[in-house]
Amino acid sequence: MNREKELIKNTFILSIGTFLPKLTTIITLPILSRCLTKEEYGIYDLINTLVFLIMPLITIKLEMATFRFLIDHRNDRKESSRIISCSLSLVGPISLIASGIIFIILKTIGFSAELCTV
């Protein structure tokens, strides 16, 4: 019975992690469609799609590996903190490098971020 409770709990946690990003997309869609022209929204969608395609390659699915190991060592606080610190030590530099590359690409194609005045 204990194993079934863990399965239900883990399934609930994963479903929240999957559902919340989709919810934010639904919430931001009307705001973006109001602020952007069709051409700007197309560029936004292209950049967004490229980021979603490239992100697993850049992060090497580190978040899923971290989650898996944290589940295995859920009761060992010392091992959990070691796993988290190792993950963060990898994610930090990878994020800075990826942000720099994205910034350079956006500057190259002439993308400018202007605030929407509603």
Image (cartoon, rainbow, N blue to C red):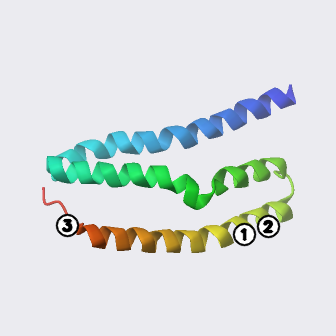
Which quarter of the rendering shows the C terminus? bottom left
Which quarter of the rendering shows the N terminus? top right
Residue 49, image x, y percentages: 39, 48
| Mark pair 2, 1: CA separation | 5 Å
Asked if disc 2 and disc 1 are in contact, CB closer than 8 Å, the reply is yes
Looking at numbered disc 1 in the image, what kind of residue is underneath it?
Ser
Residue 2, image x, y percentages: 86, 30
Q: Which residue is mark 2?
A: 82
Asked if disc 2 and disc 3 are in contact, CB closer than 8 Å, the reply is no
Q: Secondary structure at mark 1?
A: helix
Q: Which residue is mark 1?
A: 85
Residue at 20% x, 45% y: name it.
33
Q: Decide which of 108, 91 is in the foreground and name it.
A: 108
For the question of whether residue 94 can be seen, the reply is yes
| Mark pair 2, 3: CA separation | 41 Å
Which numbered disc, 1 or 3, marks the residue that appears first in the sequence? 1
Residue at 57% x, 56% y: name it.
57
Dot 1, how many residues are within 10 Å of its Cα: few (below 14), some (14-19), or many (20+)? few
8 displayed left or right of 41: right
93 displayed left or right of 35: right
Residue 21, image x, y percentages: 46, 44
Dot 3, how many residues are within 10 Å of its Cα: few (below 14), some (14-19), or many (20+)? few
Asked if disc 1 and disc 3 are in contact, CB closer than 8 Å, the reply is no
Q: Quadrant of residue 113?
A: bottom left
Looking at numbered disc 2 in the image, what kind of residue is underneath it?
Arg
Q: Secondary structure at mark 3?
A: loop
The tag on residue 40 is none
Q: Which residue is mark 3?
A: 114
For the question of whether residue 36 can be seen, the reply is no
Looking at numbered disc 3 in the image, what kind of residue is underneath it?
Glu
Q: Secondary structure at mark 2?
A: helix
